[in-house]
Image (spheres, grey):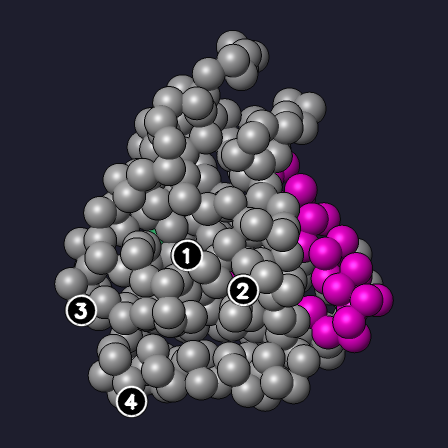
Amino acid sequence: MSLPRIQRSRGELRIHESLDELSRDLAEYVSELSEAAVKERGVFALALSGGSLIGFLGKLCEAPYNKTTDWAKWNVFWADERVVSKSHADSNYRLAKDGFLSKVPIISSHVHAINDQLSAVEAADGYQFGIRQQVKARVIDVSETCDCPKFDLILLEMGPDGHVASLFPNHAVLAAKDEWVAFLTDSPKPPPERITFTLPVINAASNVAIVVTGDSKAEAVHLAIDDVAPDCPSSPGRMVHPTEGKLVWFLDYKAASKLDGVPLPE
Ligand SMILES: O=C(O)[C@H](O)[C@@H](O)[C@H](O)[C@H](O)COP(=O)(O)O
C-alpha cells in the first residue's frame, strides 16, 4: 500500500510500503518525464547516481516501458561517479550498464560516462567540458536564471549521513559555485576519489528525485525534510531545492518512519 502523495515545502513525498511498489511508481514517473521532455525538446537528458537506485529502475526494462519509451531520445549522464576504471566493481557506470543500460536500446553515443583514464581533477574538468558541448548542442537545456545546465531529470539517493551525489556533510565541495562538476580526493565514504555535480547544477534541474529506502536513513530523511533547521551543510539532502523545478522524494515506510506528521500504518 502506498500513502497518498504529500506536498511539503521541501518537495513532494511518495511513500511506499514495498520496494516493488516504489520501483513501479519510479518507473511511471521517469517514463512520464521522458515523454514530456521528448515532446517539448525532442530529447531526454537524465543524470543517474549509484547505489540501489539502479535496481529500482529495473521496471523500466519491462513491459510496457521497454516498448513505449523513446529510448533513442535518451541521453544519460552521471550526477556523481567514482574515479575508477569503468570495469571496476565500484564504478557507477558499470553498475548502471549491468543493471539497466545494457537491457534497453539506448544509443551508445548517448551514454556520457567520465573518462576513466584520468585523475579526479582531469576527469571532472573533462566531464564538465563534455556537458558544455551537450548544452551547446541543446541535448541538455540551459537554466534561464543561472549559468548552469538544466537536466530534465537528476536521480539521486541519500546516504545515512545525508549525502547526495558525492556531496558529503560539511565537505568544502558543498560550497562550490563556479564549477558544474567538482572533484574530491577525500570522500569520507570509499572510494576516496570521485567527481560530482555541484549544488547549483542539481538545483537548476527541471526535476530532481531522491530515492531513499531503509531504516538506516530515517534520521537523515527527517533532517532533510522536516521543519527542524534551515539549510545546513550537515544535511546535503536538505540543500536540494530546484529553483525552477520540482523535487520528489521516493521513500519506503522505513525511511519515512521518523518524518513528522506522517502516520504510517502499523
Ligand atoms: O556514492 C556512493 O557511495 C553511493 O552511491 C551512495 O551515495 C548511495 O547511493 C547511498 O549511500 C545510498 O545507498 P543504498 O541505497 O544503496 O543504501
Q: Are marks 4 and 3 in contact (CB under 8 Å)?
A: no
Label 2 environment density (alpha carbons within 10 Å; few <14, some 14–19, many ≥20) = few
Mark 2 vs mark 1, CA separation in Å: 12 Å
Q: Is residue 50 magenta?
A: no
Judged from the image, the secondary structure of the residue bearing numbered disc 1 is: helix
Badge 1 amino acid: Leu
- Residue 117: image tag: 4
- Residue 199: image tag: 1
Judged from the image, the secondary structure of the residue bearing numbered disc 4 is: loop
- Residue 185: image tag: 3
Vertical arrangement, residue 226 with respect to residue 155, above or below: above
Mark 2 vs mark 3, CA separation in Å: 27 Å
Q: Earlier in the sequence, mark 2 or mark 4?
A: 4
**Which residue lies under the disc numbered 2?**
146
> Can residue 9 be seen by looking at this rendering?
yes
Between marks 2 and 1 in the image, the one whose residue lies nearer the viewer: 2
Q: Position of residue 92 (x, y in %)?
A: 39, 67
Horizontal arrangement in the rendering, residue 170 relative to residue 253 (left or right): left
Badge 4 amino acid: Gln
Quadrant of the rendering where the N terminus is positioned: top right
Q: Quadrant of residue 13?
A: top right
Vertical arrangement, residue 244 with respect to residue 125, above or below: above
- Identify the residue shown where x is 27% and y is 60%: 173
- Magenta stretch: helix, strand or loop mostly: helix
Mark 4 residue's CB less than 8 Å from ligand 1: no
Q: Position of residue 177 (x, y in %)?
A: 37, 63
Q: Earlier in the sequence, mark 4 or mark 1?
A: 4
Magenta range: 20-48
